[in-house]
């Protein structure tokens, strides 16, 4: 009996020591971080096992993604104007109608005054393509005469591309049919954008009260703050990027006209749209303009490159900091990394939406981290790491 009591006391002491050790361990930041990581990976694994359940939902979201995203972009552009009209005692529904009339006027202006010159310049570029190809053939003959100065591997790569042109052509033709089907679906989705936009403008301010009505007061206030921060980030990026792109397009158009670049309007509009892709887009838009400028006259190509560099310097050092401000707080290296990763995973759409998606994800993570530091961290602990 005495031995049994001794064993019981020893077991109790060991259990108490073990419990204290576990309590100390759970208070360590590294342990909690490891536990959260394990739980997140376990959740991802379980979701991968049940992916068949979410596949129909994904198809449904993909079907309505284009009108929702398109209407969302227009919402952030037009909602400030509707709010401004509302401040002047104009009912919201009439303000929305005025905004729609303004959009229709802009569309008709583009159709009758902007698109025809671009089409005409593009047609002239196609007509001049044989002349540029002749110049390229001259450069090609010069290159062939100097093959001994080039590495053999480079010559083999060029020859491999030439030999496989037929295969590349077949792949392009095969992809063309799938593109036509996707294009028809895209056009149908575009028709739905005005309807989504109308109801977003009309009832968008009711969304947050409706969602927070199901939550307690503290959680509702937290969600309101989160949604407000997301709204600020998205509006700053979309409105700022559109305004910056428009400014860059105007600068390019003026510069191209001054140096006498052919097809100036077409290349300026192309640069405007490509500028919507941060960092990478502007430099991609410069390639065709500079190449055509060199074929037109070497110095025109040089001046075209100088104009493009100057426009980008003005945009990066003056326009973006003052128009977008410090709301996004994204380092340029981070932006480039996110764009490259998104492009590898999701192609062009990934490049286009990488930065706003990352900014929203960062806002959400920052919000919940602040909640943790304010309410759930142990006493005396200052940071998570």
Image: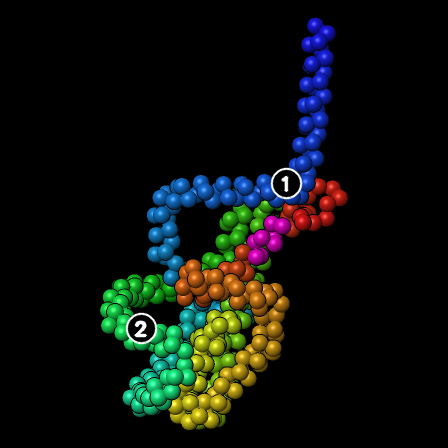
Main SS of the magenta part reads helix
Tag nearer the camera, 1 or 2: 2
Badge 2: how crowded within 10 Å, few (<14), some, or many (20+)?
A: few
Report whether 43 appears left or right of 127: right
Q: Residue lying at the far top in this picture: please name it.
A: 1
Q: Position of residue 61 (x, y in %)?
A: 38, 53
Considering only vertical position in the picture, is 6 above or below 171? above
Q: Which of 195 and 98 is in front in this view?
A: 195
Q: In which quarter of the image is the N terminus?
A: top right
Residue 155 seen in render: yes
Residues at discs 1 and 2 in contact (Cβ within 8 Å):
no
Quadrant of residue 264 within the rendered picture:
bottom left
Q: Where is residue 47 in the image (x, y as percent from the top left)?
A: 43, 43
User: Mark 2 falls on what kind of element?
Assistant: helix
Name the residue at 39% across, 84% down.
148
Considering only vertical position in the picture, is 44 above or below 348? above
User: What separation in Å lies between label 1 and label 2 (alpha carbons)?
Assistant: 55 Å
Range shown magenta: 362-369
Residue 116 seen in render: no
Quadrant of residue 184 within the rendered picture:
bottom left
Q: Residue lying at the far front in this picture: please name it.
A: 148
Instruction: Name the mark on residue 160.
Output: 2
Name the residue at 65% across, 51% down.
370
Considering only vertical position in the picture, is 352 above or below 230? below
Q: Nearer the viewer, residue 351 or 145?
A: 145
Q: Which of 318 and 136 is in front in this view?
A: 136
Instruction: Name the mark on residue 31.
Output: 1
């Amino acid at each position: 009996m005495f031995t049994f009591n001794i064993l019981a006391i020893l077991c109790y002491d060991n259990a108490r020591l073990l419990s204290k050790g576990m309590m100390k361990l759970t208070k360590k930041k590294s342990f909690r971080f490891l536990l959260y990581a394990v739980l997140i990976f376990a959740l991802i694994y379980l979701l991968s096992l049940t992916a068949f359940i979410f596949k129909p939902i994904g198809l449904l979201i993909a079907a309505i993604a284009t009108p929702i995203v398109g209407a969302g972009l227009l919402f952030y552009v037009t909602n400030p104007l509707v709010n401004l009209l509302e401040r002047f005692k104009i009912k919201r529904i009439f303000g929305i109608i005025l905004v729609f009339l303004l959009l229709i006027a802009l569309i008709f202006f583009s159709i009758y005054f902007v698109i025809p010159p671009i089409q005409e310049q593009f047609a002239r570029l196609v007509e001049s393509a044989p002349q540029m190809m002749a110049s390229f053939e001259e450069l090609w003959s010069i290159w062939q005469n100097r093959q001994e100065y080039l590495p053999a591997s480079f010559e083999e790569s060029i020859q491999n591309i030439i030999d496989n042109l037929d295969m590349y052509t077949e792949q392009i033709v095969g992809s063309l049919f799938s593109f036509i089907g996707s294009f028809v679906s895209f056009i149908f989705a575009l028709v739905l954008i005005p309807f989504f936009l109308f109801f977003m403008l009309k009832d968008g301010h009711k969304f947050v009260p409706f969602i927070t009505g199901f939550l307690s007061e503290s959680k509702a206030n937290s969600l309101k703050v989160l949604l407000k921060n997301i709204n600020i980030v998205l509006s700053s990026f979309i409105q700022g990027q559109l305004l910056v792109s428009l400014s860059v397009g105007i600068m390019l158009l003026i510069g191209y006209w001054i140096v006498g670049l052919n097809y100036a309007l077409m290349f300026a509009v192309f640069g405007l749209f490509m500028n919507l892709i941060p960092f990478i887009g502007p430099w991609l838009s410069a390639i065709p303009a500079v190449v055509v400028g060199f074929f037109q006259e070497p110095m025109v190509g040089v001046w075209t490159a100088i104009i493009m560099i100057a426009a980008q310097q003005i945009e990066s050092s003056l326009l973006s900091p003052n128009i977008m401000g410090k709301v996004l707080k994204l380092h340029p290296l981070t932006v480039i990394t996110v764009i490259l990763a998104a492009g590898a995973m999701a192609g062009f759409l990934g490049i286009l939406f990488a930065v706003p998606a990352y900014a929203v994800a960062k806002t959400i993570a920052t919000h919940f981290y602040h909640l943790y530091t304010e309410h759930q961290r142990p006493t005396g602990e200052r940071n998570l790491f």
